[in-house]
Amino acid sequence: MGAQAVSPAWRLVYRVGVFIAALVGGMAGALPVATLGLVVPEYVTVPLSLIAGALVAGISAGWAANLLAPDRTRSMLPAIAGISVAAEAVVAVAGLGLSAAGASLVFPNRFSMLLLSMAVIAIGVSFATWHFRRIDGRLTRDLLTTLGLLGALIVVILGTVFTTCSLVSCTP
């Protein structure tokens, strides 16, 4: 964490807080996109909801780490976002293999599969957030990075849904 002494209790609060922020943020980002599965084909909404959840998990964990860091270091949001999307890709490939092997035997519904996926992604994002820290940092740069990442996410979601619905029927 830094050069100054930090109590083990505070370090535990810091790490658990970052993980919970990543998990809650990831679910908050993934669930609205997953509901598009009512209209858009599932092979599009599952990876898209994982991407949205991973990116929001990375942003949430980064900001939580900024608030909880005892040494006042700042999160490197672009690096954390990159690791979160890479973790999403690994989880998506594992989920694809699991669904081919019969995921319905393991998971009773899509929500439980999404929750487990977000928990795995939150673990990866938490490790990235604990590792990618910097001493110097400005709040305006972090705010602009956050807005840019969220704007890019919205463009990707809308572009994917529009393209998919242009090529295949998206009626329920």
Image (cartoon, rainbow, N blue to C red):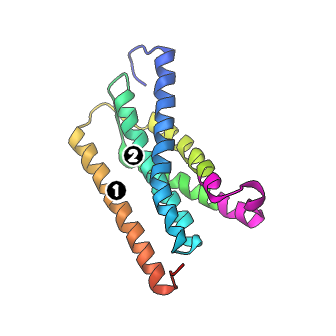
In the rendered view, does 101 fall on the left or right side of 67? right
x%, y% of residue 27? 50, 49
Quarter occupied by the C terminus: bottom right
Helix, strand or loop status at disc 1:
helix
Image quadrant where residue 136 sits? top left
Q: Which mark is residue 150?
A: 1
Q: Main secondary structure of the magenta part?
A: helix
- Amino acid bearing label 2: Ile
Q: Residue at 58% across / 44% down in the picture?
A: 119
Q: Quadrant of residue 69?
A: top left
Distance from disc 1 to disc 2, alpha carbons, whole Å, reads: 9 Å
- Examine the structure image and report whether residue 123 is included in the region drawn in magenta: no
Residues in magenta, as a range: 94-114
Is 171 located above or below residue 144 in the figure? below
* Amino acid type, mark 1: Leu
Provide residue 39's location: percent of width, then percent of height: 51, 74
- Of the residues under marks 1 and 2, which one precedes in the sequence? 2
Q: How many other residues sit within 10 Å of disc 2, few (<14), some (14-19) or many (≥20)?
A: many
Does the CB distance between marks 1 and 2 fall below 8 Å? yes
Image quarter in which the N terminus is found: top left
| Between 77 and 38, the one nearer to me in the picture | 38
Within the magenta stretch, is there residue 108?
yes
Which residue is pictured at 36% across the width and 63% down the height?
Answer: 154
Q: Position of residue 28 (x, y in %)?
A: 46, 50
Within 10 angstroms of label 1, few (less than 14), some, or many (20 or more) residues?
Answer: some
Q: Residue at x 24, y 44 (%)?
A: 141
Question: Residue 94 appears in which quarter of the rendering?
Answer: bottom right
Residue 2 percent across, percent down from the top left: 40, 22
101 in relation to 27, above or below: below
Q: Which residue has dot 2 on it?
A: 59
